[in-house]
Image (tube, helix red, strand yellow):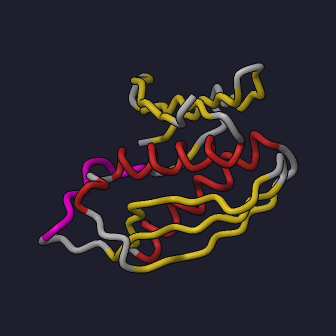
Amino acid sequence: MAKRCETFDHTADVGLSARADTLGELMEALAEGLMDVVCDRAGVRAAEWREIRVESEDVEALAVDWLSEVLLAFDADHFLAAEVTVREASETALTAELAGEPYAPARHEVRTEVKAVTYHQLSVTRRADGWAARVILDL
């Protein structure tokens, strides 16, 4: 199965539902889904690279902490990720690379302001056919 992430409506928020063969691909799909909520990634160039390392107590906390770091790159540094590559992933840590560029108002349209990644109805599960996750984003 190829990695994929789709959004779903949730009251005043939006959710991400992702599936992938590996945990690393699942985390890539979630981060790409988050960026798709924030902006049109097709218009973002992979001009700069940033490494992110996250350690957490379990796989669900890892998903929240990971997505929070991706969101922080945009909120604090105005960095938009076009591509996401997870180099190493376990259920409690990951190392990844974001390829993208700084937000340029003349070229990039911000679709939605995401305030936070939540634990509400969070699930990250290993299945017979790979991994699946559901994450709610606070808008």
- The magenta stretch is 107-114
Where is residue 10 drawn, in percent x and y? 44, 23
The quadrant in which residue 129 appears is top right
Q: State the residue in front, 85 or 17.
A: 85
* Residue placed furthest toward the front: 1
Residue drawn at x 42%, y 80% as measured from the top left = 48
Residue drawn at x 45%, y 69% as measured from the top left = 99
Q: Quadrant of the C terminus?
A: top left
Q: State the residue in front, 58 or 29.
A: 29
Q: Main secondary structure of the magenta part?
A: loop
Residue drawn at x 75%, y 22% as measured from the top left = 127
Q: Is residue 109 left or right of residue 135?
A: left
Q: Is residue 30 left or right of residue 131?
A: left
- Magenta span contains residue 137: no
Q: State the residue in front, 60 or 125.
A: 125
Where is residue 115 drawn, in percent x and y? 46, 51
- Magenta span contains residue 112: yes
Q: Is residue 132 left or right of residue 59?
A: left
When the figure is inspected, residue 133 is found, relative to residue 74, above or below; the finding is above
